[in-house]
Structure formats: structure tokens, C-alpha cells
Amino acid sequence: MNRSVSETIRVLHVDDEPDRTDLTATFLERERERFAVSTATSAAKGLDYLAAESVDCVVSDYDMPGMNGLDFLEAVREKYPDLPFILFTGRGSEEIASEAISAGVTDYLNKETGTEQYAVLANRIDNAVSQYRSERDLRASTERLRKLYGGITDAIFVLNDEWQFTHLNARAEEILERTEAELVGENVWDEFPEAVGTTFQQQYEKAMRQRVTVEFETFYPPLDVWVEVRAVPTEGGLTVHARDITEKKERERKIERQNARLETIIENAPVVLFALDEDGVFTLSEGRGLEGLGLEVDELVGQSAFDAYAGTQVVENVRRAIDGEPVHSTVEVEGRFFETWYRPVENGAGTSDLVIGVAVDVTDRKERERELERQKELFEKTFEQSNDAIFLLDPANEAIQRINDRACEMLGYAREELASLSPEAIHPEDMEQFTAFVEGVIADGEGWTDELTCRTKGGQRLPAEISASTLEIDDRTHMLASVRDVSGQKERERELEERATAMAAATDGIAILDANGEYTYVNQAHADVYGYDDPETFLGEGWQMCYAAEDVAAFEAEVMPVLDRDGRWRGEATGERRDGTRFPQELTLTALSDDRLVCVVRDITERKERRRELERNADLLSRTQELASVGGWELDLRDDELRWTDEVKRIHGLGLDYEPTLAEA
């Protein structure tokens, strides 16, 4: 019968006795038609064969010249850590078995007389290869699922602070089974009353109340759906990202069931070695792991496992192993956790009279695994879900280890190009502050700053907010930094400052000039003062357009020095309109911190004319009073300005320099 490539099991048998290798190959291929057995007469030749050919399982003798079976096993494990390896030896002993298990042997079998041993060997090979292939297929399946989940589009909906829907995307309509037209303006708790009092309400209210992002997974029975939710507080509401993970949950449960069935029996070097007879009495007990239990080597020998560990899972494990069932279990003994393997050794009659076991103290490993898993989940979640630029840095080597797409987009680099840059290339003007920030993060475990800028590939400097934390990767401290471009926010803040300063200075014509004296902002009143219809006419032009040449020279000689010294100047000047006419003006100049200038101007032509008219009237009245010996006073209702003639002051016995107030009149 022809054997397909997918069904064939390729076996390499290594033994220094050619007759035995040929005999073994013959019997194995007779036991299993899908076996294809190749042979080598030394460990060195076996290694050469492995380097050139594909092999599913290695079967090796122990006692061979040059390199024995254990040395051969160690050499194989260096290059092929998961390849099934069975030690098939005529020099069996508990010591050799223990060393083989320590070196990572898949199975151990003593050579016997008779052909029955080949049936046993064929069965061991079949089981080892089946498990090896299943684990390999499971890893491939898991990777395919991971790639599939990465492409799923999130559902997004927005709630205002009254819990009313303001927006839904198409995916949200699908999950909620309602259209945007049906939900916008409606209260989420009224439309989905089954969610009241559940994780949804608790987490949404927490996000809204505390202004923090919340993430959770939960099941919503009315829609029969599992969702992964990320709720982000926004200005006046909440943005919710929801992903339907129902299929993912089902696949995860299936994978978990597969993992439970396919867990390997031997996958770690042992710490405690033990053996039990058919009555559950210890015949071997050794290893440094005994110290954690307060035991000496062989102290348990002669004792019954059923008595020594009564009331623990150990009793059930031993009973199952004696009954012929391989057992893999993690048990708690004396406050320590041990991962244990029990392998029954058949006596040829279908029962077991010996159980060989390995127990590994995994207490510290369990704690490390939990911490590593937490770090890994945090790391992947940050990269996959963040809308900010993310950098993974190795501070010791000043190297960028990993970046996300947003980082490339923000700085304008291709991924490989950006990853090759040093931090100094991104923060050339701020390296001193950047170094201090990194040192602070490493010392405190986390940090935040808004005092750094990032230089893009095109040379633009972007103001940035950076939050960072440390994490351990391969026993090295790394820094995970989230970088947000806040140039838009900074620009808005600057505009607000400019507008507020200008409005506080005056309510007339207002303009803002840059450090070069060119207009960047002009209001309509300012344009009207100088006879222009459109304020944009001024933008990009110098202030000199509003003054005659002699007035420009006077400004530069008299006003600018005062402005540079005091940061402010106020006084009267003469402006020039678009049509060339000149007019008196009251002018206020205020310097900003970034060398820009706020200008407030008022046309005082009418005020000047009124003052001249008042002065003429006052002179006429004074002359009249002198002739008639009467006094008079005048109130300007437009300025609330009160004036007495000299005759009134003389009548009241006051000095001519006395200035009356409106309250005294």
C-alpha cells in the first residue's frame, strides 16, 4: 500500500550495532505501514542525517562509542527542542532514566527479548509523533485566528452627557439592531433597559464621572452577543468602541479544550524525581526540590504516598497512575505549587508495577508567568487600540525597538526608517529635557510631560504630550511611550490668549502683528479706521502702511524704544487713511511674550474738534463774565466732563486752578 507524505512517520534509529538497527527497522515498518525508518550507526552520523533530512522521531540506543545516547539527546535538543526523542536502551536503570528525563527525553524504553518490544516501541513512536504534530497544528491555527481578529471593524456610537445617542456608525447599527435614525436623540437606558444595573451602566457611569477610559468584556443576553468595549470620555459625553467577539469567545473555548487535551507530559526539567511501586510506596525520592518541602533525599522511601499526602490531590493522582493512566497535574503541597507527571511502567501483563514521576516547583514561575502575561496584554492592547503614536524604547542602548503606524504617520517616516533613528534625531532641540524625562520614568516607573517637541522628517517641530511607563522584556528595562501631537491644541490656546489680550486692551480697532511687524489679525473696526473694507487686506503687510513716512520715523525713534523697555506704550499719534488723508488717533501698543504685538487704535478726530470748540466757547464765556460779573458752568454729556468758568471760581472763593467734580456740582 502506498503511504502518503502527510501520513508517513519518518523515524531515525541510531544504534552502533547495524544488525540491530536493520532488525528494528524491519519490525517497526511491519508494525506500522506508515513508518519509514532510516538508520545511523553513530550519534555523529545521526546528527548529520538530521541536518540533511526531515525526521518526525528519533529512536536512540544509550551505550554507543564516542557519544552516548544522553549526549546525543542533548545535541538534538539544542537544535530541535520539540522533536520527539525515545531512548531505547539495553542498559536501563533509574539513574539513566532520571538523567534522560532531565535532558528532555520524550520517552524511555528498555530493550527486551522477543518481538513484543517492537510493538510497544511502535506504539510509543506513534503517540509521541501524534502529540508533536497536534501541538504544531494548534500553534498554526492559533496564529491564523490572531490575524483574523486583527481585521475586525469596531462599532462606534457617541452619547452626550444626558445619555442620549448623537451618532452611530454602520457596524454599531448591526450590533444594536437599530438604525441611527431610530436612536439619535434617545436615551440609551430607555432604549436598552436590560442594560440598566449591568456592567455597561457601571462602567459607562465610571468613565463619565471620573473622566477615565474604561475597557471591559461582557455578554448582553437580549442580543445574544459578547462584546469587547472601550469607552472614552469626550467633551460633553462619551465615545464607545464596541467589538463583537462572540465568535472569538467560542473559538477561545474550543482552543482551551484542545490545549487541555494536548498538554505535553514532559516539557520541563525536573526538580524532584520519585518512583512508586504497585502499592503506592516510594522507592525513589531525590532532587533539590525536596528542600522546599523540608525533606531529605530518600526520606520518603518506604512510606506510602496515600499516608504521606492524605487529603491532597496527590492521592488521586497516584491511584490513577497505578491503574495505568498517565497523569499530568499541578498540586499544592506544603504551601508550594508543583507541576507533576506520573508515567506508569507496564509489566507486560497489561498492568503497572512501577510509576516514575517528576515534580517541578513552579511557585515562582507561576508568579512570573502572571506578570509576564499582564505585561504582554498591556503591550499588545496599547499598540492595537491607541490612536496616539507609540514607541517602545531601549533606554540603555538609546534605540527604538518598536513603533506603531500612528508614529510613522505623525512624523512622516516609513516604518524601517523611523525605527533606525535615535531619540536625538526626533528631539534634537530637547535632548537634555528628554534625557531627564527618561531618567524620571525609569526611577518612578511612569511619567508625563508636555515640555518636549518632536521633529518630523520635513523639519517641522510638533509640540507633544508624552506619557510613559516601564516594562521588563527579556530581563531588560524598556520604556513604552505614548506621544500625542498637541499642535492644534497649542494653536487654539495661543489664539485664545491673543484674542483675550486684545479685547482686554480696548474695544475699538484691534490688530495683532508678528515679530516682523506684519499683521496676522485685524478686526473690522481697525479696517474701518484706516478706510479699508476688508480686514484681510492688512494680513501679511507691515504696520508702516498706516502711517506717513515722517510718522514712521517718529515711531521708530520715540515709541519703539519705550515699547521694548516697558512692554507697553499708549499715546496719541497721526494715522494715514487709504485715501491719503491723515487723522489724529489714540493708540495703545502691548507686547506679547513671543515678540508679537497687540495694537488698539481709536480715531479721535471728533474729540479733538469738540475740545477746540469747547476751548473757544470757554474763552468767549470768560470774556462775557468779566464784562457782566457773572459766572457759568458747562457739562459735556458725551464725556461727563464738568467745567467752571473763572468767574464762578472767584464767586465761590476758589483758586483758578481748582477742578470741580460732577458730584460737587
Image (spheres, rainbow, N blue to C red):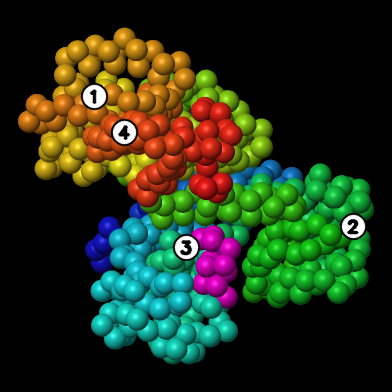
Tell me the residue at 36%/25% (across/down).
571
Asked if the residue under mark 3 is in contact with the one under mark 1, i.e. CB atoms within 8 Å, the reply is no
Mark 1, residues whose alpha carbon is within 10 Å: few (<14), some, or many (≥20)? Answer: some
Image side of residue 592 versus residue 649, left or right: left
Q: Identify the amino acid type marked 3.
A: Pro
Q: Is residue 67 visible?
A: no
Q: Identify the amino acid type marked 4.
A: Leu
**Above or below for 392 versus 310:** above
Q: Which mark is residue 620?
A: 4
Which callout, 4 or 1, points to the residue nearer the camera?
Answer: 4
Q: Earlier in the sequence, mark 4 or mark 1?
A: 1
Residue extending farthest left: 579
Query: Dot 2 lies on which element?
Result: loop
Q: Earlier in the sequence, mark 2 or mark 1?
A: 2
Tell me the residue at 63%/51% (across/down).
371
Q: Which residues are magenta?
A: 202-213
The residue indicated by pointer 2 is: 300
Q: Earlier in the sequence, mark 2 or mark 4?
A: 2
Which callout, 4 or 3, points to the residue nearer the camera?
Answer: 4
Place of residue 644 in the rendered image (x, y in percent of width and height, measured from the top left): 45, 38
Does residue 555 belong to the magenta stretch? no
Which callout, 2 or 3, points to the residue nearer the camera?
Answer: 3
Mark 3, residues whose alpha carbon is within 10 Å: few (<14), some, or many (≥20)? Answer: many
Mark 4, residues whose alpha carbon is within 10 Å: few (<14), some, or many (≥20)? Answer: few
**Above or below for 609 versus 544:** below
Q: Earlier in the sequence, mark 4 or mark 3?
A: 3
Image side of residue 243 versus residue 120, left or right: left
Query: Dot 4 lies on which element?
Result: helix
